């Protein structure tokens, strides 16, 4: 099929590249000329394992193209995907200005019958607004062209984006038209080798809702477990044991019940807020969803609080080694990362910070933690330890899982570890002579 993917952010770039990998002819469109120029040369603006090689392979194979010219590419396309950003507006709702601008441009340029797919995470009712925006433009052009707006939310995770897209748990297609559904089924059939069972079709509004509910449900599991961790500490239980105890119940399951320093990233914080806002707009107070957000805000500061309990509120003269800045491993993304809040708090209290992250240091230095002279960056995890009073682990990168503990002890002023992701066995840490603080166990 000939596909146009509008927006070369995380979702657009990964979707476009994976569709190309399956043999479709894909053009990814973006208004950012510099980005498109780079992408044409195989320069990927984000770190995502496997993506660069796949982009280059498909550029060479001429299945993947990049352009700023939407009008030109709409002429030859069967399906147009809207995958532009939906940033959080001031009131917590998703800002639809980019989505609706693209819809308007589609209406201004389309010349034949087309399927338009909302791939961006958009609130319930957006497909209607997209349809209306396109229709308005067609009316201005005095044209009567048939088109269908389909909702096809994307569930990929950063760091696993390629495998999530190529081998999806499910694909949700919300469509009010049978022929459009059929076309979407054909497009996705190569992604399910054994059966088509995992393509779930429904009405447009339910599909739009599904994306928010999936993310809010996962965020709820995390906040629930973080709350349980805090209670465990108070009652003298070990959340790591409780997690295994409950996860073994197949109705509960092991995934997304890891306690830690709270969830971050581009999706959970934004989508939880937007769902709460949508409910509010319809006169409903979503208490549980609000609590999920409140617990997460509080959880981000749990490790900073442990540092204060150990060293006192005034941290002047103290130095802390930070292992991990990204909101999770395998990404350079620092959006809503707990590290931002924790490091700022430590610095405000007078501490110095020596940080290391395998991928996110540029993001930190130039954006999220810029203008903070008390924060310095190092090329290896061991270098950060020199002269530090404690090590604080905030992202569970694999390279932090089994460090040289002897070196860790030697380099630190005092052998103290605050673990915001429960990576180590506390008995082992004690045997090695560390003072070890983790989440959910005193
Ligand atoms: C998420 C969804 O998983 C994905 O389906 C959706 O399309 C986009 O949002 P992503 O933000 O990339 O993906 O990351 P994910 O791996 O889901 O982790 C989100 C956050 O939850 C991270 O900060 C992670 O550290 C945290 N988390 C996850 C926990 O604290 N505990 C867990 O058990 C799992």
Image (cartoon, grey):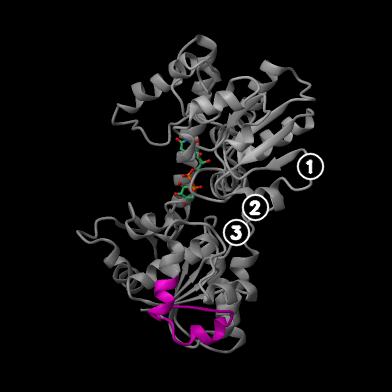
Q: CB of residue at label 3: within 8 Å of ligand 1?
A: no
Q: Position of residue 59 (x, y in %)?
A: 44, 77
Q: Earlier in the sequence, mark 2 or mark 1?
A: 2
Q: Residue furthest top?
A: 236
The disc label shown at residue 86, or none: 3
- Rendered position, 371 above or below 102: above
Q: Quadrant of residue 150?
A: bottom left
Q: Do the numbered discs 2 and 1 sit on residues whose CB atoms are within 8 Å? A: no
Q: Earlier in the sequence, mark 3 or mark 1?
A: 3
Please state the extent of the stretch shown in magenta in the rendering.
56-77
Q: Marks 2 and 1, how far apart in space?
A: 15 Å
Q: Is residue 320 visible?
A: yes
Q: Marks 2 and 3, how far apart in space?
A: 24 Å
Residue 57: in magenta span: yes
Q: Position of residue 129 (x, y in %)?
A: 57, 66
Label 1 residue SS? loop
Q: Is residue 177 visible?
A: no
Label 3 residue SS? loop
How crowded pointer 1 is (Cα within 10 Å; few <14, some 14-19, many 20+) is rated as: few
- Between 9 and 199, the residue placed more toward the observer is 9
- Rendered position, 113 above or below 150: below
Q: Marks 3 and 1, how far apart in space?
A: 33 Å
Q: Residue at x 44, y 86 (%)?
A: 76
How crowded pointer 2 is (Cα within 10 Å; few <14, some 14-19, many 20+) is rated as: some
Q: Quadrant of the N terminus?
A: bottom left
Q: Residue at x 59, y 20 (%)?
A: 415
Q: Earlier in the sequence, mark 2 or mark 3?
A: 3
Label 2 residue SS? helix
Q: Do the numbered discs 2 and 3 sit on residues whose CB atoms are within 8 Å? A: no
The disc label shown at residue 373, or none: 1
Which residue does the numbered mark 2 point to in the structure image?
A: 362
């Amino acid at each position: 099929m000939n596909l146009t993917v509008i927006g070369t952010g995380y979702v657009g770039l990964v979707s476009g590249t994976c569709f190309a990998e399956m043999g479709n002819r894909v053009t990814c469109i973006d208004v950012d000329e510099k980005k498109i120029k780079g992408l044409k040369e195989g320069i990927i603006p984000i770190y995502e394992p496997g993506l660069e090689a796949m982009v280059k392979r498909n550029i060479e194979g001429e299945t993947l193209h990049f352009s700023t010219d939407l009008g030109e590419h709409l002429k030859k396309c069967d399906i147009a995907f809207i995958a532009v950003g939906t940033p959080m507006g001031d009131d917590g709702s998703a800002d639809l200005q980019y989505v609706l601008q693209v819809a308007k441009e589609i209406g201004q340029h389309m010349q034949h019958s087309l399927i338009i797919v909302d791939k961006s995470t958009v609130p319930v009712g957006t497909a209607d607004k997209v349809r209306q925006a396109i229709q308005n433009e067609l009316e201005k052009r005095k044209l009567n062209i048939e088109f269908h707006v389909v909702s096809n939310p994307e569930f990929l995770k950063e760091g696993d984006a390629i495998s999530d897209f190529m081998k999806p748990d499910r694909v949700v297609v919300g469509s009010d038209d049978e022929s459009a559904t059929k076309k979407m089924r054909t497009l996705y059939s190569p992604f399910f080798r054994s059966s088509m069972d995992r393509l779930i079709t429904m009405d447009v509004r339910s599909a739009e809702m599904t994306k928010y509910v999936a993310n809010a449900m996962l965020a709820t599991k995390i906040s629930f477990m973080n709350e349980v961790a805090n209670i465990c500490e108070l009652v003298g239980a070990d959340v790591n044991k409780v997690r295994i105890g409950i996860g073994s119940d197949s109705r509960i399951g092991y995934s997304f019940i890891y306690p830690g320093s709270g969830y971050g990233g581009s999706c959970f914080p934004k989508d939880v807020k937007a769902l709460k806002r949508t409910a509010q707009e319809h006169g409903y107070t979503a208490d549980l969803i609000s609590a999920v957000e409140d617990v997460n805000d509080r959880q981000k500061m749990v490790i900073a609080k442990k540092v204060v309990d150990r060293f006192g509120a005034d941290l002047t003269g103290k130095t802390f080694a930070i292992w991990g800045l990204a909101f999770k491993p395998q990404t350079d993304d620092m959006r809503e990362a707990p590290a931002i809040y924790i490091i700022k708090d430590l610095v405000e209290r007078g501490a110095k910070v020596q940080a290391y992250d395998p991928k996110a240091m540029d993001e930190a230095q130039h954006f999220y933690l810029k203008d903070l002279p008390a924060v310095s960056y190092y090329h290896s995890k061991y270098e950060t330890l020199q002269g530090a009073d404690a090590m604080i682990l905030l992202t569970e990168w694999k390279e932090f899982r089994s460090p040289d503990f002897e070196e860790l002890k030697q380099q630190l002023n005092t052998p103290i570890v605050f673990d915001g992701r429960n990576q180590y066995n506390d008995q082992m840490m004690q045997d090695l002579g560390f003072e070890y603080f983790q989440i959910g166990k005193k």
